[in-house]
Image: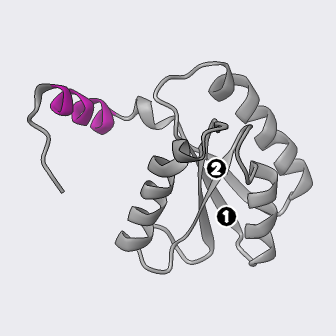
Amino acid sequence: MTSIDTGIVLFAHGSRDPLWRAPIDAVAQAIAAQSPGAVVRCAFLELTSPDLPTVVDELVSLGLGRVRIVPMFLGVGRHAREDLPDLVTQLRARHPALELTLMPSVGEHPALTALMAQIALGTAPTP
């Protein structure tokens, strides 16, 4: 759950294929459905708009004091280890009063690992 002064940013790589972002948008819609009033946005590293600085600027302009960045990566590669932390450092310098929290990549969460195993086994619950 999130408080009204906290924004959630689902951060993903991006792609030239416009259909690629559909699952990320679906997660944002699910968050909004589960937590009406939540301020949730999607941001992308490259090839897809908007980028992370644009989204964080928007959330600051809405008066939010906290932003939680959720990397939507299954693995922790260079983007999660280097590029994203560098972006967050730049954003902290740009918005010193903003509390920015960089969450671990979703692929590191045990619940997601368990769900992926259930999907592979054909035993995942259907929504």
Residue 112 horizontal side relative to residue 102, left or right: left
- Where residue 106 sits in the image (x, y, percent)? 45, 37
**Residue type, mark 2 in image:** Thr
Q: In this picture, which residue range is highlighted in magenta?
A: 110-120
- Tell me the number on the disc at residue 101: 2
Residue at image position (12%, 47%) is 125
Describe the element under mark 2 as helix, strand or loop. Answer: strand
Is disc 2 in contact with disc 1, using a CB cutoff of under 8 Å?
A: yes
- Where residue 36 sits in the image (x, y, percent)? 43, 79
Describe the element under mark 1 as helix, strand or loop. Answer: strand
Mark 1, residue position: 66
Residue 39 horizontal side relative to residue 48, left or right: left
Magenta span includes 116: yes
Distance from disc 2 to disc 1, alpha carbons, whole Å, reads 8 Å
Looking at the image, the residue that sits furthest to the left is 123
Quadrant containing the N terminus is bottom left
- Tell me the number on the disc at residue 95: none
24 to 89, vertically: above or below: below
Q: Earlier in the sequence, mark 2 or mark 1?
A: 1
Magenta span includes 106: no
